[in-house]
Amino acid sequence: MFRIEPLRKKALLYYESGRFHADILNGREIFPLRYPFKKPNERALVASIEEVREQMATLRRSGTGGYIEYRTLEYKTIGRQRLPAALSFETQDEFLRFLGKEEEYRLFEQGFEEARKLGLGEFLRQKPQILLKNLEHWRSILSVVRFFLENPKPGIYLRELPIEGIDSKFIQSHKKILDTLLQELLELESYDASITRFSNYGFERKYGLRYPSNRVRFRTLDLEARVCGVEDMEIACEAFNSLNLRARRIFIIENLTTFLAFASLPSALAIYGGGFKAGQLAELDLSFAEELYYWGDIDTHGFAILSSVRSAHKRVRSFLMDRATMNRFAQLCVEEPSPTEADLPNLTPEEAALYDELRFGAYRAMRLEQERIAMAFAMQRIEAML
């Protein structure tokens, strides 16, 4: 009935949500500020008189007495009673002192003033919780923002940014807030607004930083067409595109040992696909090949990768990922630990039917790993294609 904690929580929520800061920054009158206790009716008061006395004693002992507003109420059977009416604050200082937030709010004011000088005043008046949530690192965050304002699209690696006290790990862990503030301040021509995600070096690409190039490992299966006499190499995707390669067929192979054991073939390349994301694969120019194949495990995730690869290269055909292969080596299947049931948009009707069997039907949670398929069987299938 007269417990202080529920009212303390209300006051704290007002502060921590940023609404208090927004009201102050926007010049709204909020003091005196009151959080009323519920007015007790006589029956409830009489029935709980001992509890009420204990609660009032607790209020007096809690050190909040200076913030409790009292009123005198008249009751028929128990007469006049002086009871707590509200948790009340006459000034901002009282409110902050009650919550123990004096020092934090002082830092908030300093942080706001520094941000205002950069041009973030109006933005933070509307969204002060952004500053409040990042108060511990605010000065460092503004140092990074200031650098990009003075040096848009710097063309260097994060590791090279000459900002005192700032390392690349700090920026990596604060990309979201930096992105929010930089979009608010930078001219449109100073960043790529079309980039909204930070995967695959999205932050670096968006703000004109250098980043490690994606790399591709491949084998020239045609012994007479090796690059500089090298059969197996790993290079940047841009370098791959500049090699002016020639091949009729390309096999994207998910498993490393299968990739390495894949036999020599005329006018053919093998690309190691293990861990290679479709977004990275999209960087490769494979238009020189007449036929593209993907060979992965026959399980739900194998078809998910196939669908993803096909989103980058629509001409890709699956290889040894069919019902006949599944039946031929069924005795070698193992359990797939965590099969996906996601709908996949880029499968052929035959692939989709087998995928449905793997997620819902007779092959549910089964996996035929690529390396369990005999290479002799694989080469027979290839010879039939030649």
Image (cartoon, rainbow, N blue to C red):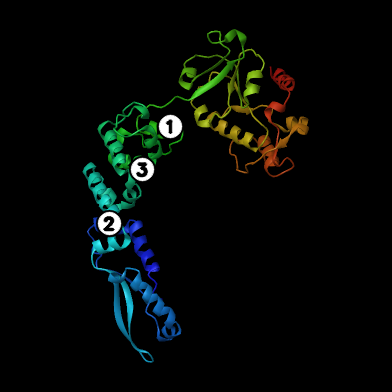
Q: Amino acid at mark 1?
A: Tyr
Picture quarter containing residue 344?
A: top right
Q: Which mark is residue 177?
A: 3
Choose between 89 and 318: the one closer to the eye: 89
The residue at the point 30 percent across, 29 percent down is: 162
The residue at the point 78 percent across, 33 percent down is: 331
Q: Could you tell me if residue 286 is visible in this image?
A: no
Is disc 1 placed on a helix, strand or loop?
loop
**Can you tell which of label 2 and label 1 is closer to the viewer?**
2
For the residues marked 3 and 2, what is the alpha-carbon distance in whole angstroms?
25 Å
Is disc 2 placed on a helix, strand or loop?
helix
- The quarter of the image holding the C terminus is top right
Residues at marks 3 and 1 touching, judged by CB atoms closer than 8 Å: no
Residue where numbered disc 2 is placed: 102
Tell me: residue 252, above or below residue 194: above
Q: Which mark is residue 201?
A: 1
Q: First in sequence: mark 3 or mark 1?
A: 3
- The quarter of the image holding the N terminus is bottom left
**Residue 325 location, x and y as percent?**
73, 29
**Residue 112 location, x and y as percent?**
25, 48
Q: First in sequence: mark 3 or mark 2?
A: 2
Number of marks: 3
Q: First in sequence: mark 2 or mark 1?
A: 2
Q: Amino acid at mark 2?
A: Glu
Tell me: residue 372, above or below residue 235: below
